[in-house]
Amino acid sequence: MSTANWIQFYTITRKEIVRFTRIWSQTILPPVITQSLYFIIFGGFVGSQIRDIEGVNYMGFIVPGLVMMAVITSSYSNAVSTFFQAKFQRNIEEILVSPTPNWIMMAAYVTASVLRGLLVGLVVFLVSFAFVRPQVQNPLIIAVFVLLTAIVFSLGGLLNGIYAKKFDDVSIFPTFILTPLTYLGGVFYSIKDLPDIWQKVSLLNPILYMVNGFRYGFYGSKFSDVNVLLSFGMLLFFATALWILCLNLLNKGTGLRS
């Protein structure tokens, strides 16, 4: 990366970080409160009626899933909202007429969204200590999975933002696809407890692989519903495919030309 590219990347990234930190009460606080309610309702009330899972209480079991849920929703919502707003307010034209390459612009938006997702995930993880003391067996696996997941959903949010033509388009995918997939992705349960047919159906949910890989870093293979290497491979595939797709769309001017 040349000095000019670095300055372009830093400028856009810094602007986006300042934007979401300035309105932290809208971007960081709400998901933390939401996940705290999950800890209280599912971990406290529902979990008290559920036996320990492989020697770990239910509250500890759902911690990785809730942290990952916070990372997914925050990364995605930041990318789609900020990119669409830039299109709607037409200030993205200032970047497009500058000598900033599309890949630099895309990398900056994704980086800011990843940082927001990781920040919210970290806060949720720290909040979990008020309810339980989660184990951490492999910090490297945890870091790899949470980073790749944040990248994948930041790129997914950017893709949504590229195609979005009105504000309703920003909320359709998260409401009707992302949220159901997240809830059915093994956040609150192990698919081993499901009937065989639903175990097979669950394997079609990509979020299952992300949550399980992340949980593997906390508790090891006893909670792994799917192979951790397969989960890692799927994340790399989605990240690469979405990067290529988004860059190709930006180069064509999709969603940017009136």
Image (spheres, grey):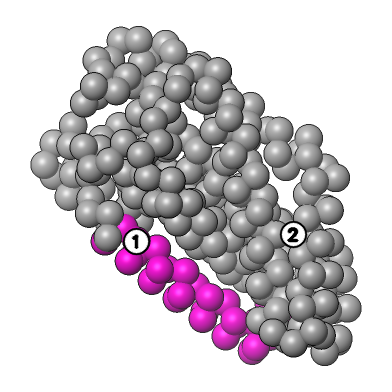
Q: Position of residue 252 (x, y in %)?
A: 64, 89
Q: Position of residue 193 (x, y in %)?
A: 18, 32
Residue 232's label in the rendered image is: 1
Seen at 67% across and 74% down, the residue is 106
Q: Is residue 77 magenta?
A: no
Amino acid at pointer 1? Phe
- Left-right relation of 200 to 135: left
Residue 148's place in the image compared with 120, above or below, is below
* Quarter location, residue 54: top left
- Seen from the viewer's position, the closer of residues 251 and 1 is 1
Q: Residues within 10 Å of mark 1 (few under 14, many from 20)?
A: some
Seen at 45% across and 76% down, the residue is 241
Residue 43's label in the rendered image is: none
Whole-number angstrom distance, CA of label 2 to CA of label 1: 28 Å
- Left-right relation of 6 to 192: right
Which residue position is annotated with label 2?
82
Q: Please report the bounds of the magenta region as a residue range.
A: 230-258
Residue 14's place in the image compared with 65, above or below, is below
- Left-right relation of 73 to 58: right
Residue 19's place in the image compared with 224, above or below, is below
Q: Position of residue 138 (x, y in %)?
A: 37, 45
